[in-house]
Structures are given as C-alpha cells and as structure tokens.
Amino acid sequence: MQFWLVKTEPETFSWQDLVSAGKTVWDGVRNYQARNYLAQMKKGDLVLVYHSVTQKAIMGIAEVTKESYPDPTSDDPRWLAVDLVPIESFKNPIPLQWIKSQQALQNLPLIRQSRLSVMPLTTEEFHFIVSHSQNSNF
C-alpha cells in the first residue's frame, strides 16, 4: 500500500463535497509530475485530502477505488484520473501552519513543492499526520 496527498480548492470541490457524493473522479490534473503520481496510485491506497488556497488544512482520508484511466475532462489521453471514496473525516482539520512546524514532516512535498497537486507520502509521514488528527491544539 502507498500513501498520497491530493490538493483541492474547497470553493471548487471540497472534502464535504466528496463526503456528500460518496465517491468522485479525481480529474483535471494538468501537471506532468502530478499526473505521473496518479499513474502510480493503486486500488486500496490511502489519500489525504488537503484544502488549498483558503483553508490550507488536511481534511480527511480517502481511498483509491479505481486505478488511473484517461481523464474524462480531456481529449488528450496522456492526462489521467483515479476514483476516490471518503474513508474518514478528521475531527480537527490539520492546518498547514502546524504541518510546517513539525520536524517529522519537513521533507513533505506539500512544504517542499507547494504547487504540486498530487504527491506521495512516506508511511511514516502518513501515520504521523493521522495520529494527530484528533488533536485540537493546533
């Protein structure tokens, strides 16, 4: 199993939208590096969903239910999409400010490549973040 983080603008498609819908096609990615990461996602992989722009926080955990396939929003078959379902909402969203303050997360692509919309996480990074998801002292 691999672990990932995907970014979304909550004004366009929020974590709550995913929870309400029960599943989604994760499409519209138009960055080659992010696309390559989508191609590596496997069914059963876990994905942290991050709200960018306004909220800047990790909202919950989703799971990949369908591996990469041609993005239905593009005529170019090089662009890919995956299907995600929500697994768990975080009681307290994990803010970017807290993430940046944690030594264990200093190599997180979210910090080092802030414009990347799909990124891998190490097992340790994923579990560190999830273990703090019940913390209300952000």
Image (cartoon, grey):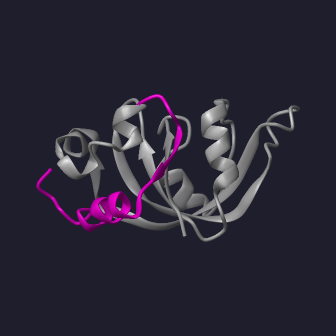
Whether residue 118 appears in magenta in the rendering, the answer is: yes
Please tell me which residue is depicted at 28% across the width and 51% down the height of the picture: 94
* Residue occupying the far left of the picture: 137
What quarter of the picture does the N terminus occupy? bottom right
Q: Position of residue 92 (x, y in %)?
A: 26, 58
- The image quarter containing residue 85 is bottom right
Whether residue 95 is visible here, answered yes or no, is yes
Residue stretch in magenta:
114-138
In the displayed structure image, the side of residue 76 where residue 138 appears, left or right: left
Q: Position of residue 67 (x, y in %)?
A: 72, 60
Q: Position of residue 104 (x, y in %)?
A: 23, 52
Please tell me which residue is depicted at 41% across the width and 31% down the height of the picture: 114
Q: Please state which of residues 100 and 122 is positioned toward the viewer in this rendering.
A: 122
In the displayed structure image, the side of residue 14 where residue 29 appears, left or right: right
Whether residue 135 appears in magenta in the rendering, the answer is: yes
Please tell me which residue is depicted at 57% across the width and 66% down the height of the picture: 45
Q: Is residue 66 above or below residue 107?
A: below
In the displayed structure image, the side of residue 130 where residue 97 appears, left or right: left
Q: Please state which of residues 106 and 110 is positioned toward the viewer in this rendering.
A: 106
